Amino acid sequence: MTRRMINIGAVCSLVGIVAVAIYWYHVGVFHDLDSLQAYLNSTGLVGPLIFILIQIVQVVIPIIPGGVSTAAGVVLFGPWQGFLYNYIGIVIGSFINFFLARNYGKPFILHIVSEKIFDKYMAYAKNQQRFDLFFAIAIVAPVAPDDVLCLIAGLTHMKFKFFAWVIILGKPITIAVYSMGLVFGAHWLLHLFHG
């Protein structure tokens, strides 16, 4: 039943994203980046809310790689607003993962990740203090599997207060690294090709 709900959620999310993309294509939004940004600015709060919802979904149901959607936020909304919308969506999604794991346990997590990955990260959780430290460091590291670790954290004796502070204070660092990497990388490429 849980597996079916996750699959339905993933399919509905993917269909929704494709439907929006097709609609935007037909109205000429994808003509160039300026057109897309102008369209999103004209939607008021709707554009940012849709993007935040996409970020929440991709954290809970990984249908899009997190780095791709984070980069999209910066490209679509600019570095500051993109950072903010990424942050809100990823933090909410991380909290949802923690509570889903805490309420539904290992069977739920195994619908999201393989048993091999589950066992790999659960090995760190044998010592709660060590896992708490590992979790805090991993959340700040840009390449760590944050979504999996949030699920694993929900199975441990980690206090939600600790979890929340690590996510709230650590996530901005990771998102900033992705955002700055994208902005400076794009400027570097432009300079390389036009210099």
Image (tube, helix red, strand yellow):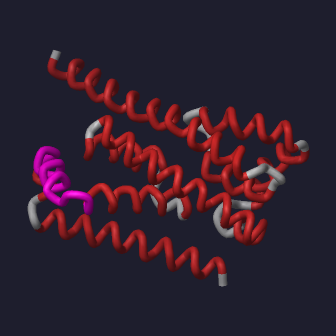
User: Looking at the image, can residue 28 be seen?
Assistant: yes
Near-viewer residue (106 or 153): 153
Residue at the far front: name it: 161
The reply, left or right, for residue 50 in relation to residue 31 is: right
Q: Position of residue 132 (x, y in %)?
A: 78, 40
The reply, left or right, for residue 13 in relation to residue 123 is: left
Q: Position of residue 179 (x, y in %)?
A: 39, 34
Near-viewer residue (154 or 161): 161
Q: Is residue 124 magenta?
A: no
Task: Kindly identify the residue that appears in the image at 76 percent across and 60 percent down.
Answer: 115
> Magenta residues, as a range?
32-46
Task: Kindly identify the residue that appears in the image at 28 percent across and 41 percent down.
Answer: 75
Near-viewer residue (57 or 121): 57
Q: Position of residue 90 (x, y in %)?
A: 50, 51
Location of the C terminus (image quadrant): top left
Q: Is residue 36 magenta?
A: yes
